[in-house]
Amino acid sequence: MIKDFQKIEFLKSLYSDKDLISFRGNFLKNNSNRKFSLRSFIIKLLPMLKDKKILDIGCGDGSFLNKLHTVYPQNKYFGLDVVDNAKCHKLKFLDYKIYDGKSRVYYTEKFDVIFCMHTVYHIEDLFTFFTTMKDYLKPHGIIIITTKSKLTFPKIESIFLKIVGKLDLKKYLKISKHREESKFCLENGLNRLKKHFARRSFSINEYVLETQVFVNDKKDLLKYVFSTNRYNILKDTLNKKIVEKYTKLWFEEIDKDQIFIDKYTEAVYLIKKL
Ligand SMILES: C[S@@+](CC[C@H](N)C(=O)[O-])C[C@H]1O[C@@H](n2cnc3c(N)ncnc32)[C@H](O)[C@@H]1O
């Protein structure tokens, strides 16, 4: 299923679902064996943030800034996204803006820290996007970009490919070789960033976080799987029978083990303006 990962209408269908972002975040939190979440790791990585201006591009439901705000209440927080999320409007400390993903949003002030987490793979024109980001940044400012490995959840991916083969799904659907996130992922992220953030002006550090997930609740697991764009064929095919078979095969596959174990890998890039 090659879906247009950059089109706003498609992004709305993915992210305006009120609780999808928090469901997916909670699923990982509740079933992973790591002590620090990606977000806690990032908060530990950063220097003390007091009296700073902080922007989150692709802020989703605002939950990261909300967490950061509880640790550091004395900052100005700005959130930007292409999809409106009601939760952000409730965050009184947040200056929240929605834009079309193309035209530049003007801010009167520059930022000390800019976050862009699990969002860059949605960006079509990286040159314009990163140029804007650099313009937004103060001297000695910091950018945090995160993404996934294209090999995240290898077991889920191999079950998917097995089912695709069994049902001959490629006859009905266009299925890309990798998940859509592979447009900007651990495997190509650093090189892409080096092209846009010149060495003479920026330092870039890469951190890789590997996490195992152990899932007992198979229904929750399937909900997670089907909330992943690549594995959600329901939107693509009107053939009810195929969808039924597809769902049944997933149930059978993940029921083979008492506890489903898989791993996911994420990357954090810390970019500092020198
Ligand atoms: C996977 S979610 C990540 C949300 C949040 N950063 C997090 O880590 O939970 C990707 C977010 O990027 C947003 N997005 C996609 N394209 C964008 C763009 N061009 N500018 C800003 N946000 C964008 C989506 O609407 C969505 O909220």
Image: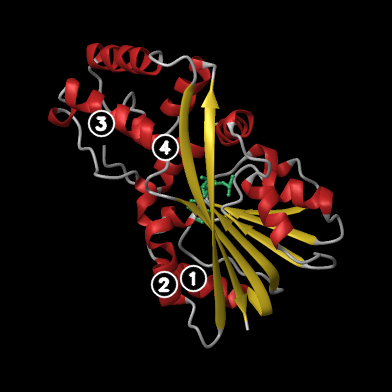
Closer to the camera: disc 2 or disc 3?
Answer: 3
Residue at the outermost right position: 74
Question: Considering the image in quadrants, where does the N terminus appear?
Answer: top left
Contact? badges 1 and 2 (CB < 8 Å): yes
Contact? badges 1 and 3 (CB < 8 Å): no
Contact? badges 3 and 4 (CB < 8 Å): no
Which numbered disc, 4 or 2, marks the residue that appears first in the sequence? 2
Question: Which colour assignment does the render follow?
Answer: secondary structure
Give how far apart the Cα atoms at labels 2 and 3 are.
34 Å
In the picture, the disc for residue 153 is: 4
**Nearer the observer, 145 or 131:** 145
Which numbered disc, 2 or 3, marks the residue that appears first in the sequence? 2
**Nearer the observer, 107 or 237:** 237
Which numbered disc, 1 or 4, marks the residue that appears first in the sequence? 1
Give how far apart the Cα atoms at labels 1 and 2 are.
5 Å
Q: Is mark 1 within 8 Å of ligand 1?
A: no
Q: Position of residue 271 (x, y in %)?
A: 58, 71
Question: Considering the image in quadrants, where does the C terminus appear?
Answer: bottom right
Three-letter amino acid code of the residue under disc 2: Phe
In the picture, the disc for residue 130 is: 1
Which numbered disc, 3 or 4, marks the residue that appears first in the sequence? 4
Q: What residue would you read off at disc 3?
A: 161
**Above or below for 227 versus 139:** above
Q: Residues within 10 Å of mark 2 (few under 14, many from 20)?
A: few
Q: What residue would you read off at disc 2?
A: 127
